[in-house]
Amino acid sequence: MSDQDGSGKVSGAFKAKKMVVQTSLLLLGVAFELVSKHCKDMQDELSGWDAGRVLALGVLPDGPFIAVRKELDHLVYLGKGDHGARIKILFKNIDAALVMLTGQVGAHTGFAEHRAIVHGSINEAMQANRAMALVTKFLFPGIWLKYITKRPPKMSLSDYKTYFLVTALIGPTLALNATK
Amino acid sequence: MVYVPKYYEFFCPVKIVSGNMALKNLPYEMDQLGAKKAMVVTDPGVAGAGLIKLVEAAFEGSGARIGAIFDQTPPDSSDKICSQVAKIYKDKGCDCLVAVGGGSSIDTAKGANIMITEGAEDLLKFQGAERLKKNGVPFIVIPTTAGTGSEATSAAVITNTEKGIKMSITSYKILPNTAILDPKMTLTMPPKITAATGMDALTHAIEAYYCLQKNPVSDSFSLAAIRLIMDNLVKCVSDGKDETARLAMANAALLAGISFSNSLVGVVHALAHATGGVAHVPHGIANAIYLPWGVEYNIKKSAEFISELAPLLGASASGSAEERSKAVVSAIHDLNKKLNQLSGMPIKLRDTGVKEDQLEAIAKVALNDGTIAMNPEEVTQEDALGLLKKAY
């Protein structure tokens, strides 16, 4: 049976994939907030964002979506939905979202394979892409990043500090934001 | 070796009408699209060179006619200009857009087509990829340069005058229906512009061949384009009246356009776009200057693909992939030097009027250019600055 047969009914496999994607998006949204509060490089990157800019990530056609907004020098996880974002990174389907969000393919490969598109300014999307790369630096192990990035990021001493902080705080922060 | 990626997409529905007297088929092509009254979009240079008279002459004895001519397209297309074109189109009851010119006239017609079709004044909401759902009005392009390949690309770059930003709109819906390549339309191009636009086409073909969205279909277009450029660009610069070489270059630009519209480009274009934005260096010249440095920068990641171009560029085809790739870089430098001697086309950034203290700003802007995402090698601001210094 296909994931969706046009009748609106979806298979258990589709539901499972959607749940993984939803959780991955929540993790990414929360990580955006945590990393932006503790990583100097991320704050430097965000200095190029205008105040209040909302970035949404989601799956076409019906979601799930999440959004983050720039406030002061960091990002705040807004929760589910696109929150009227001016810039949206959209995965074309649930499978595309699954392989990209779970790190099976890197962002550059995903975009090269047309698995995601951008709605909004390309310049702002490039900034968002760099910010996302900074977040993934703290979410995936170095050996994994070697395969999904063009050039594996280097970890400085302060990056290790951020890494430990993010690792320690991600669980409780996820729990706090799970219903947002 | 033919490389087949794990996944790719390719789309080009543009009808190509190429050759001597191709322009005479304009009314017939309009009829094929169900159109009778054309709105011509062009620029003062093209009109001044008498090329619109050739277009008008093509309508003689046909059932179709020109409803309006807009010949004030500036070098950088803007939403206000698109809006003017869309208004004239509606007021004069036209049913078809005919762009005659280079990238700016073609992008203006693409922007106007969106406004006409979507009934929109503001193009901001169409920024990004694949946001248009409606098919445009019949749209024919007659290029007068052999470089941009815009007659076969799904992208338009239009300035938002209010916000002072360049909007990038990518959609299969803005592809022209027909491209008419007539050698008579490029005969008046001066040698320097011929050289720069030709190098623009070569950059499209080469970058498309090794950047991340490459695929076997776009590769075949790139290879044909490179062959045509290497055989004909110098001929066109040396003798602008060589119609055979002009037609070959028009085809090369089209083929390179189809290729890069489907496989995108990389750091060379990112730097060229940024240099245009910061220091107003013409796109073709910037591409020519950056191409050898950009190719060299990617050898570590893409030697396998770059080295395949060696025989086409007249470079040494022996040695390791890395050695052959380096020979490709040398061949591009040699071509640039030859074009510089023949036409005065600058081959160093310092000769274009760019000041050294502008390099940092160019590097910063380049990082936000979408093309950099498809470059095989990672590019940081430091890397971009290093490339700019080499090209300076």
Image: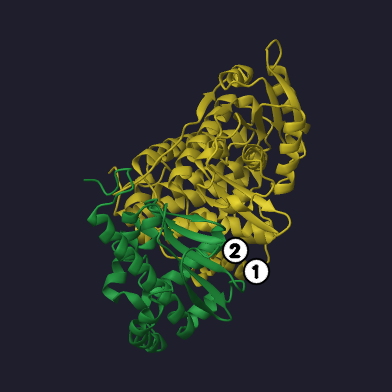
Residue B268 picture location, percent across and down: 51, 56
Q: Residue at x 51, y 27 (%)?
A: B16
Image quadrant containing the C terminus of chain B: bottom right
Q: Which residue is mark 1?
A: B356
Mark 2 or 1, nearer chain start: 1
Q: Amino acid at mark 1?
A: Glu
Q: Is residue A171 above or below residue A152?
A: below
Q: Which residue is mark 2?
A: B392
Q: Is residue A41 above or below residue B7?
A: below
What shade has chain B been given?
yellow
Q: Which mark is residue A45?
A: none
Q: Amino acid at mark 2?
A: Tyr
Image quadrant containing the N terminus of chain B: top left
Residue A135 picture location, percent across and down: 41, 74
Q: Which chain is green in the rendering?
A: A
Using the rendered image, report if marks 2 and 1 lie on a common chain: yes
Residue sitting at the far left: A1
Q: Residue at x 48, y 38 (%)?
A: B258
Mark 2 and mark 1 residues within 8 Å of each other at the beta carbon:
yes
Badge 1 sits on which subunit?
Answer: B
Q: Is residue B245 above or below residue A36?
A: above
Q: Residue at x 26, y 61 (%)?
A: A16
Q: Residue at x 45, y 50 (%)?
A: B207
Badge 2 sits on which subunit?
Answer: B
Q: Nearer the viewer, residue B168 or B137?
A: B137
Residue A13 picture location, percent across and down: 23, 56
Residue B293 picture location, percent across and down: 49, 58
Name the colour scheme.
Answer: by chain
